[in-house]
């Protein structure tokens, strides 16, 4: 089976098993991935972390841009997708980890990334899990680092702005569906997981 068709079938199978966790029926296009990675300085990075590597479309492009002595840690929660990825991509700079991005803090063991690339389907996830995953983005970055995020809607923008001082947004039509790209810098020194306070009601005696 040709690689792209095989990837499509694998992602569709994972989607049927766990639709909210996968959040997409088609792999991200290479054009969208390239536009996303153009928003961060991957070639200068010492450590890049990818969250939700899936079929590896972004993993391959990150490796193509990454320096010889640098490292890429790619997290994928689905065991079959993770196994397939580590079998197919034989690169000494790559470490595929089968686990949840919720545990990123512990997995990095005190290390911090220059670039975090998130392919996670934030908007289809349950709200508490989404907030815990979003909290990992600023925590995983070195000062001056960049998190790049791809989504199929702009709904996550407010939550990103609570966690980063600067969020640039792009839209790429070269994906099915068209994708929103976010480049986040200036990680705020807080967990950022809380929602804005509810408006106060005035009570009259
Ligand atoms: C929208 S798909 C992205 C797939 C990739 N862009 C591709 O085209 O193959 C989201 C991926 O995130 C993974 N994922 C979801 N929740 C995760 C979590 N908590 N930790 C790590 N990976 C997760 C899913 O299994 C899925 O592979």
Image (cartoon, rainbow, N blue to C red):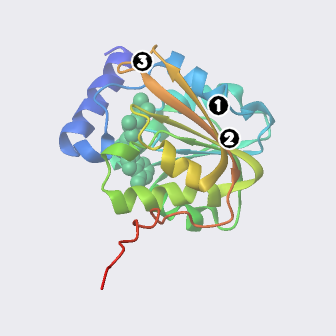
* Left or right of 39 on screen, residue 97: left
Viewer-nearest residue: 4 or 138: 138
Whichever of labels 3 and 2 marks the residue nearer the N terminus, that label is: 2
Residue 146, label in figure? none
Question: Which element type, helix, strand or loop, lies under badge 1?
Answer: helix
Q: For ligand 1, which image quadrant applies?
A: top left
In terms of secondary structure, where does tag 3 sit? loop
The answer to whether the residue labelled 2 contacts the one labelled 1, judged by CB atoms less than 8 Å apart, is yes
Looking at the picture, tell me which residue is in the foreground, 36 or 104: 36
Q: Residues within 10 Å of mark 3 (few under 14, many from 20)?
A: some
Q: Nearer the viewer, residue 142 or 50?
A: 142
Q: Nearer the viewer, residue 144 or 193?
A: 193
Residue underneath mark 2: 93
Q: Which residue is mark 1?
A: 63
Q: Nearer the viewer, mark 3 or mark 1?
A: 3
Residue under label 3: 175
Task: Say left or right for 113 vs 135.
Answer: right
Q: Secondary structure at mark 2?
A: loop
Q: Position of residue 200 (x, y in %)?
A: 40, 71
Task: Say above or below: 175 vs 103.
Answer: above
- The answer to which quarter of the image holds residue 3 is top left
**Residue 77 visible:** no
Q: Where residue 98 appears, x then y in whole percent? A: 44, 53
Residue lying at the far front in this picture: please name it. Answer: 205
Which is in the foreground here, disc 3 or disc 2? Answer: 3
Residue at image location 67% in from the left, 29% down from the top? 39
């Amino acid at each position: 089976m040709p690689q792209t068709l095989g990837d499509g079938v694998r992602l569709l199978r994972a989607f049927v098993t766990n639709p909210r966790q996968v959040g997409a029926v088609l792999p991200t296009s290479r054009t969208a991935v390239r536009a996303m990675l153009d928003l961060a300085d991957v070639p200068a990075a010492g450590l890049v972390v990818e969250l939700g590597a899936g079929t590896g479309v972004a993993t391959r492009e990150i490796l193509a841009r990454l320096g010889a002595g640098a490292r890429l840690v790619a997290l994928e929660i689905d065991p079959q997708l993770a196994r397939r990825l580590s079998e197919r991509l034989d690169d000494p700079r790559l470490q595929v980890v089968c686990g949840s991005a919720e545990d990123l803090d512990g997995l990095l063991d005190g290390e911090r990334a220059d670039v975090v690339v998130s392919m996670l389907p934030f908007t289809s996830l349950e709200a508490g899990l989404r907030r815990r995953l979003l909290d990992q983005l600023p925590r995983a970055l070195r000062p001056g680092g960049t998190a790049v995020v791809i989504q199929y809607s702009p709904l996550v923008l407010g939550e990103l702005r609570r966690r980063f001082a600067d969020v640039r947004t792009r839209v790429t039509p070269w994906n099915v569906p068209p994708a929103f790209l976010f480049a986040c810098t200036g990680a705020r020194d807080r967990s950022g997981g809380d929602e804005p306070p509810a408006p106060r009601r005035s009570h009259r005696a």
